[in-house]
């Protein structure tokens, strides 16, 4: 008797709702869902589900939710196979619209779980490990003070900061050191990984990234190569979904979801390539510069300490020939290549001829360096 009544109840619930012609709402083109589990806890229930066929799920979902109004950040509940299981509406296009027989319904499960696992990182770096960039290190003190005591800032809290400068100048290192010293979660992600395979995926990933950071606040989001998803409008024709991704990013950066104690740091090599609407959201832009003579000497000496071979090098000359190079280039293109060259030639000592080989093989010429970035 109990089972029969339950079946009758489910049957009545699953009756397709009638779509009213005079409903003053648009029909939804796309709805992106994320499974979030049950609204209550019961030992016999499993919070996780596995979708084996997303196309079949789309038909299944569209049939039972036909005619319902969908709004972003609200929920839909299954009333068929797994009654009362909730799905968060991550994206509704357009928002506050009606599910029709033509609405595409996408579900994101494994992709978002991988995003969560892969973005939250830990680091052993400290600010003292970063050579140079004194201006940048001084400016991030505001972030330090804010995350240590968010309540004292009120509406004046720093929210969005832009790091810009040539590759290898320490943008990623600084944010790792900052998060480590503050002991806060760091969600570090390449902007290109936020671009999905289907329309709506990118917006969904951005929403989920900010939501996860907010749940674990205080925290830092670091979006490297942000120009990949926030191109200037003159380049947006290169990608059809870029405007949707930009709009989603702007929504999160504006703090509409009230991401308290979440700092967003974007990084780019070329700030002029950014969409103006995105760039205007950054209240401060911090430049990362190439190291000067004194800083290059410190970078070289620090790296030589860990060399597996002895070395006989003219450091004064080495400082001159590496002018215009970033700290990463000095380590990876010059010192590492010189080390490998010495090992390949069965030498037990790194000498200046190995440095010359490195400069030549990596197409770094002394004449080129002389006039670079002056």
Image (spheres, rainbow, N blue to C red):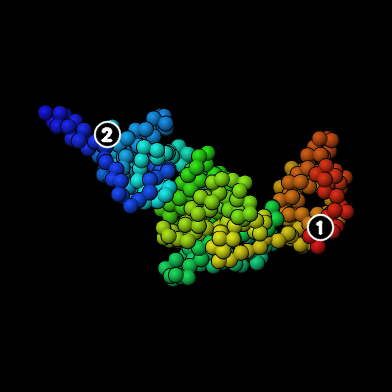
Kindly tell me whether residue 122 is visible in this rendering. Answer: no
Asked if residue 183 is positioned above or below residue 30 in the image, the reply reads below
| Residue assigned mark 1 | 372
Side (left or right) of 155 relative to 124: left
| Quarter holding residue 84 | top left
- State the image coordinates of residue 366 (x, y, percent, origin top left): 87, 52
Say which of 149 and 66 sits in front: 66
Query: Which of the numbered marks, if any, corresponds to residue 79?
Result: none
Q: Residues within 10 Å of mark 1 (few under 14, many from 20)?
A: few
- State the image coordinates of residue 37 (x, y, percent, origin top left): 33, 41
Residue at 78% x, 47% y is: 334
First in residue order: circle 2 vs circle 1 = 2
- State the image coordinates of residue 147 (x, y, percent, origin top left): 48, 63
| Quarter holding residue 322 | bottom right
Residue at 41% x, 47% y is: 92
Say which of 174 and 32 sits in front: 32
| Residue assigned mark 2 | 80
Q: How many marks?
A: 2
Kindly tell me whether residue 1 is visible in this rendering. Answer: yes
Callout 2: helix, strand or loop?
Answer: loop
The quadrant of the picture occupied by the N terminus is: top left
The quadrant of the picture occupied by the C terminus is: bottom right
Callout 1: helix, strand or loop?
Answer: loop
Side (left or right) of 82 relative to 374: left
């Amino acid at each position: 008797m109990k089972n029969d009544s339950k079946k009758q109840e489910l049957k009545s619930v699953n009756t397709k709702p009638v779509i009213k012609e005079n409903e003053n709402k648009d029909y939804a083109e796309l709805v992106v869902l994320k499974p979030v589990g049950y609204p209550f806890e019961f030992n016999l229930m499993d919070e996780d589900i596995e979708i084996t066929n997303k196309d079949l799920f789309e038909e299944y979902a569209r049939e039972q939710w036909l005619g319902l109004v969908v709004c972003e950040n609200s929920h839909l509940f299954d009333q068929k196979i797994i009654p009362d299981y909730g799905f968060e509406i991550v994206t509704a296009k357009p928002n506050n619209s009606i599910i029709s027989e033509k609405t595409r319904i996408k579900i994101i499960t494994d992709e978002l779980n991988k995003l969560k696992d892969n973005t939250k990182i830990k680091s052993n770096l400290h600010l003292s490990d970063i050579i140079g960039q004194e201006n940048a290190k001084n400016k991030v003190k505001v972030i330090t003070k804010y995350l240590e005591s968010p309540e004292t800032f009120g509406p004046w809290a720093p929210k969005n900061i832009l790091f810009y400068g040539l590759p290898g100048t320490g943008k990623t290192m600084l944010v790792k050191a900052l998060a480590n010293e503050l002991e806060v979660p760091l969600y570090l992600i390449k902007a290109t990984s936020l671009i999905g395979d289907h329309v709506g995926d990118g917006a969904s990933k951005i929403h989920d990234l900010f939501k996860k950071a907010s749940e674990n606040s205080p925290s830092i989001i670091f979006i490297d190569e942000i120009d990949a998803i926030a191109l200037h409008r003159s380049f947006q024709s290169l990608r059809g979904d870029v405007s949707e991704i930009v709009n989603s990013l702007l929504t999160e950066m504006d703090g509409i979801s009230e991401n308290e104690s979440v700092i967003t740091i974007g990084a780019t090599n070329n700030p002029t390539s950014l969409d103006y609407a995105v760039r205007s959201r950054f209240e401060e832009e911090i430049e990362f510069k190439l190291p000067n003579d004194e800083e290059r000497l410190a970078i070289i000496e620090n790296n030589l300490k860990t060399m597996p071979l002895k070395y006989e090098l003219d450091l004064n000359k080495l400082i001159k020939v590496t002018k215009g190079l970033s700290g990463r280039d000095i380590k990876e293109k010059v010192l590492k290549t010189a080390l490998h060259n010495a090992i390949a030639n069965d030498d037990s000592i790194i000498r200046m001829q190995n440095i010359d080989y490195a400069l030549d093989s990596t197409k770094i010429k002394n004449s080129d360096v002389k006039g670079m970035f002056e």
